[in-house]
Amino acid sequence: MRSRLAGWGLGGLALVAALGLPLVNSEKSVLTDAILVYLAAALALSWNIIGGFAGQVSLGHAAFFGMGSLVTRFLWLDGTPIAISLLAGAAMAGLAAFFLGYPGLRLKGIYFAIGTLALAEAIRITVGNVFPLVTRLPGEELRAYDLIARYYVFLAVVLVGVAVTVYLQHSRLGLGMMAAREDEDAARAIGTNVFFHKLTAFVLSAVIAGLAGGSFAFFHVSYYPSYTFSAVWTFDALIVVFVGGIGTLAGPILGALFFVLVRDVVAAKFVDTHLLIFGTLFVLVVLLFPGGLLEGWHRLWGWAKTRASSWRQEAGGQPAEGRPLG
């Protein structure tokens, strides 16, 4: 109970800090770095629903990011308010996930993963052929460009992802997803509709990915449609989730901070070898902490509590746990 209250307290402080950041420091570089962290966190939170809660390794997540981005961009530049454009893009991504997931989720294991990757690549190539040119904001929109407004849009998308994750952690729907993840046969034996829970996870993850894609379209001045369908968005999300801690709330957020900040620092200092260095860091984190950075934090916290208890016992004249008298 105490640890849960501490977690909520830290979350509240982080939210206050995020809301107040543009008021304290509105420099373009600072807000841009924060936006990149939010983008990585939103994508990771969305993939974590299908991969972490439902246990389905989808390699076609970029398709939903791209759909949300494309629909949002076209509607917004056509005069539709950005809020409605974002919702429409998310709805399109969710609808696509439903129709693609209904047959696709009947595949299992590696077949599902490869199938989603192939489908996403087919969509990327099609979009690149239909929309081959880079688009830019018209002069009126460019003059009215407000980075702070875009900052808050990205923050709102992350909060949606956090809210959905918290709901799944404490609801029958989320428990059904986790039961299907652990053992589908056992889940069916206790009355869980495995396919329904997997499809629901697939749609929810696509909706949040669509919101993230729409925010990306709203943020960029120059926009290349097929780029938002690139597999890099899928694999970035996977890296962030596994680095932070799959199937958790804090893991994708910690992973996003690590991914963006460390990647940028390494890229700035080691221009020629930054990809090799970052890849090595990623492998070390996964090897040392299979549960991600969140597992590393729990280990460190446990060690600190044990040491503090030992010091208190020694200071009080009592032997530390496990140590003999004399």
Image: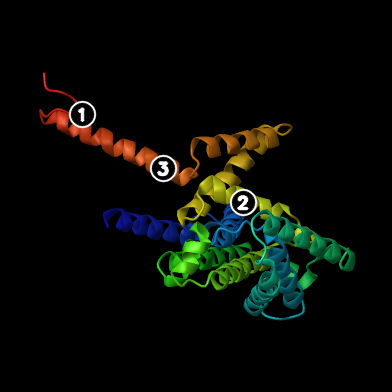
Q: Which mark is residue 83?
A: none
How far, Cα to Cα, is label 2 from label 3? 20 Å
Real-space Cα separation, disc 3 to disc 1, in angstroms: 24 Å
- Under circle 1, the secondary element is loop
Query: In the image, what residue occupies the spot 67% across and 60% down?
Result: 61
Q: Which mark is residue 238?
A: 2
Q: Position of residue 288 (x, y in %)?
A: 50, 35
Q: Using the rendered view, name the quadrant where residue 36 is placed.
A: bottom right
Q: Secondary structure at mark 3?
A: helix
Q: Is residue 110 above or below residue 156?
A: above
Colour scheme in use: rainbow
Which residue position holds label 3? 297
How far apart are the two marked residues, 1 and 2, measured between alpha carbons? 42 Å
Residue type at numbered disc 2 = Leu
Mark 1 vs 2, N-terminal side? 2
Q: Is residue 300 above or below residue 177?
A: above
Residue 53 visible in the shown view: no
Local SS, label 2 = helix
